[in-house]
Image (cartoon, rainbow, N blue to C red):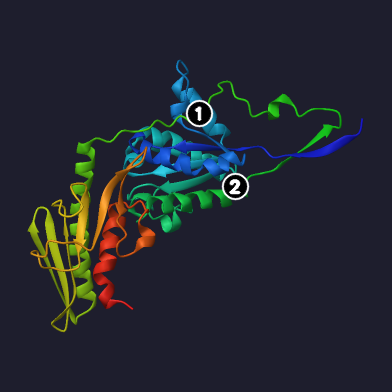
Amino acid sequence: MRKLTRKVRSVSTLFFSYSHVDEDLRDQLEVHLSALKRQGLISSWHDRRIAAGSEFAAQIDQHLDSADLILLLVSPNFIASDYCYDLEMTRAMEKHRNGEARVIPVILRPCDWHELPFGKLQAIPKDGKAIKTWPDIDEAFLDVVRAIKIALQSVRVNTIAVPATAAVPEAFSSATPVIRSSNLRVRKKFTDLDKDRFRHEGFEYIAKFFEGSLQELATRNPNLDQTFRRINTNQFSAAVYLDGDKVCQGSASISGGVMGGNSIEYAMTDDARFGGMNEAVSVKADDQMLYFEPLGMQSYGRHKEKFTFQGAAEFFWGLFIQPLQP
């Protein structure tokens, strides 16, 4: 019987190794991977897909051993987890060294990871900058997805010699013993307390960000002086002086003011008596996370971005330092 050479491109299996503390970030990453799933390029697996009554460790071992791509979702909790670090990561690196799978570290949160066994691998997002420190978290996840898409190009395309009349053998089927949807994400509910805490913690981050940035700015530029004043727990002001003349000034407040109780307001003055605002970020929530959304009075094109603490701080700082920049 004449035989044909048929190319069968198998769906690449992606395994998430992560700490349950970071489950919300894993969920968001899986949402961003939806385009690759819809194109039939990947299927993904993590331990939340273990069926009731199944042996936990055996299921993880099975899927880890069969994975083409292994994502290490790196955070302080991942490194602290004996299971993630000693078992999953160790086995993943063994498969990587043997050419059986490709391991990609995805840095979720800032931590000391560079000297660990996976520290020599190319980490994502770009430059290994932790996802939580990106100004716009969606841009961080997009960078991760693009890198994974490039990595998929190295996944082997199987060439199989089969009889012209034969079907592809059962062994090449993508069916698994447990058939279930990958769409298992559940909407999260954020209370007013969650939102208030997020706003206050975000404000503290912005205040420390301004204070540290002002100190570094003056250190690098001897002709500049700076002031940072914490007016009260809910307000700070800042100014920069060039040869004694005030060139930059601003203040931030969570007192409610013009935008109400779910925002942080920014004014382009260091005069606490001003009582107005020129820009603001408001606490918003989607089905997975809390974030800051800019009002967009000074830069309308950014009004639908999803800011982390870092993103909101950079947003206000950009307005503050603008007079000193081209």
Q: Amino acid at mark 1?
A: Asp
Q: Amino acid at mark 2?
A: Leu
Tell me: residue 245, above or below residue 313.
below
Q: Residue at (39%, 32%) from the top-left corner?
A: 83
Tell me: residue 149, above or below residue 49.
below
Observer-nearest of 281 and 118: 281
Mark 2 Cα-neighbour bin, 10 Å: few <14, some 14–19, many ≥20 = some
Q: Percent x, y for residue 281? A: 26, 54
* Tally of numbered discs: 2
User: What residue does disc 2 label?
Assistant: 152
User: What residue does disc 1 label?
Assistant: 61
Say whether residue 299 is left or right of residue 36.
left
Observer-nearest of 183 and 102: 183
Q: Percent x, y for residue 123? A: 45, 52
Inter-mark Cα distance, 2 to 1 = 22 Å
Secondary structure of the residue carrying tag 1 is: helix
Tell me: residue 34, above or below residue 273.
above
Q: Looking at the rendered structure, which numbered label has been put on residue 189?
A: none
Residue 57 appears in the figure:
yes
Q: Percent x, y for residue 141? A: 44, 49
Residue 117 appears in the figure:
no
